[in-house]
């Protein structure tokens, strides 16, 4: 006597033999499913060197890519259809974060777009639900959904171009290399099928190489030229020495970027001029509509009462947390014993920071 639901040994053996006799490789495709005619086509994207100038959370850099190459595909249909568009879907194994970004690694997120033809499509942000390319020229002859399908006449290039935007999660030191990272898979089907796609991607987009760097930089003031008005001065070197008043020049300095992300670096700063005053190289030279060889500009760091010599470098007193103010004063100075011709004068120089 046999209890319901209990298999005898004979039945179990028969069941095992039936499973063993299933043809290896048998697979039923979805109606309208499109797979590559061969292995999935890989697009290897090399983004080379990308620079993020703002080394803070939220700093971004975007690069476009266009990779040559296309591929043929096979389609599976239970009945013949004509004048059909292709629906494409973009997937990724990366976890979504926010604003269309994906979790790339501990330092950054990435937003990837892939170009898909069709009105209203264009650059589609990965991942995206099935969208039609609105090219109603595709056909499919009825074939066995368990068989090899039908090779389509057209060549595919979906996934071959797009953009990658990297966004920092936290500051990085100097740079980070990304290599061999799969960021997108593209699937296709002749009918949307309620948004259902098959399991074989037509193409993959792989970042083969990307070097993300954050250069060290220091900004002087707001990045614009600093101008100083010395006013009117006497016309003799002796009178200038006695009566000309120094003018305060405050130069804000803020440093950021790779090395400054985790360290409070003490930079050097200097005033560079190709040809200082001919009568004394400790002074800046001046120019004007008349001879200015005997007129120069003396610079002094007010906090330490230190003479600032052109083309030399100095510490900034009070420079802390990668920023500070260089407190200078500028005063005209004449070559001793000379008369200074009347007229306008000016001096120009470049402020430069030097990293240790």
Image: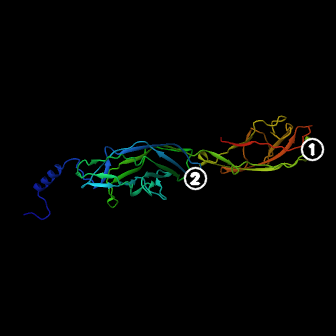
Say which quarter of the image contains residue 348.
top right
**Position in image of residue 73 (x %, y %):** 32, 47
Q: Secondary structure at mark 2?
A: loop
Task: Identify the residue at image location x=83%, y=34%.
Answer: 278
Count the marks: how many?
2
Task: Identify the residue at image location x=84%, y=45%.
Answer: 331
Q: Secondary structure at mark 1?
A: helix
Query: Is tag 2's residue or tag 1's residue first in the polypeptide sequence?
Result: 2
Q: Is residue 238 above or below residue 59?
A: above
Q: Residue furthest left?
A: 1
Residues at marks 2 and 1 touching, judged by CB atoms closer than 8 Å: no
| Residue 107 seen in the current view | no
- Which residue is under mark 1? 239
Q: Is residue 12 left or right of residue 217?
A: left
Q: Is residue 153 above or below residue 130?
A: above
Task: Identify the residue at image location x=82%, y=37%.
Answer: 277
Q: Is residue 80 left or right of residue 116?
A: left
Quadrant where the N terminus lies?
Answer: bottom left
Q: Is residue 59 left or right of residue 303?
A: left
Q: Is residue 310 above or below residue 302?
A: above
**Position in image of residue 261 (x %, y %):** 59, 49
The residue closer to the viewer here, 276 or 73, is 73
- Which residue is under mark 2? 56
Q: Residue furthest bottom?
A: 4
**Position in image of residue 337 (x %, y %):** 92, 37
| Residue 160 seen in the current view | yes
**Position in image of residue 208 (x %, y %):** 45, 42
């Amino acid at each position: 006597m046999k209890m319901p639901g209990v298999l005898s040994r004979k039945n179990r053996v028969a069941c095992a033999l039936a499973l063993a006799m299933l043809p290896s490789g048998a697979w039923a495709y979805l109606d309208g499913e499109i797979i590559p005619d061969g292995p999935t086509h890989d697009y290897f994207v090399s983004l080379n060197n990308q620079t993020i100038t703002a080394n803070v959370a939220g700093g971004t850099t975007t690069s476009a890519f266009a990779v040559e190459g296309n591929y043929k595909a096979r389609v599976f249909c239970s009945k013949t259809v004509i004048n059909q568009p292709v629906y494409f879907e973009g997937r990724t194994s990366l976890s979504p974060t926010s604003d269309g970004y994906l979790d790339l690694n501990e330092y950054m997120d990435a937003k990837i777009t892939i170009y898909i033809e069709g009105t209203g499509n264009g650059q589609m942000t990965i991942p995206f639900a099935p969208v039609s390319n609105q090219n109603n020229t595709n056909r499919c002859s009825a074939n066995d959904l368990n068989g090899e399908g039908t090779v389509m006449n057209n060549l595919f290039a979906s996934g071959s171009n797009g953009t990658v935007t990297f966004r920092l999660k936290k500051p990085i030191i100097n740079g980070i290399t990304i290599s061999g990272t799969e960021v997108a898979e593209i699937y296709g089907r002749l009918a949307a099928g309620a948004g259902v796609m098959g399991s074989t991607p037509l193409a993959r987009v792989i970042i083969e190489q990307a070097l993300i760097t954050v250069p060290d930089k220091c900004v002087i003031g707001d990045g614009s030229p600093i101008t100083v008005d010395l006013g009117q001065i006497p016309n003799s070197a002796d009178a200038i020495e006695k009566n000309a008043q120094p003018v305060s020049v405050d130069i804000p300095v803020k440093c950021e970027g790779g090395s400054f992300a985790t360290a409070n670096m003490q930079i050097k700063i200097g005033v560079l001029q190709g040809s200082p005053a001919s009568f004394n190289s400790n002074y800046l030279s001046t120019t004007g509509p008349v001879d200015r060889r005997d007129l120069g500009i003396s610079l002094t760091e007010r906090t330490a009462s230190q003479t600032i010599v052109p083309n030399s470098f100095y510490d900034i007193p009070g420079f802390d947390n990668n920023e500070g103010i260089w407190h200078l004063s500028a005063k005209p100075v004449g070559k001793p014993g000379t008369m200074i011709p009347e007229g306008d004068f000016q001096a120009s120089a470049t402020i430069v920071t030097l990293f240790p």
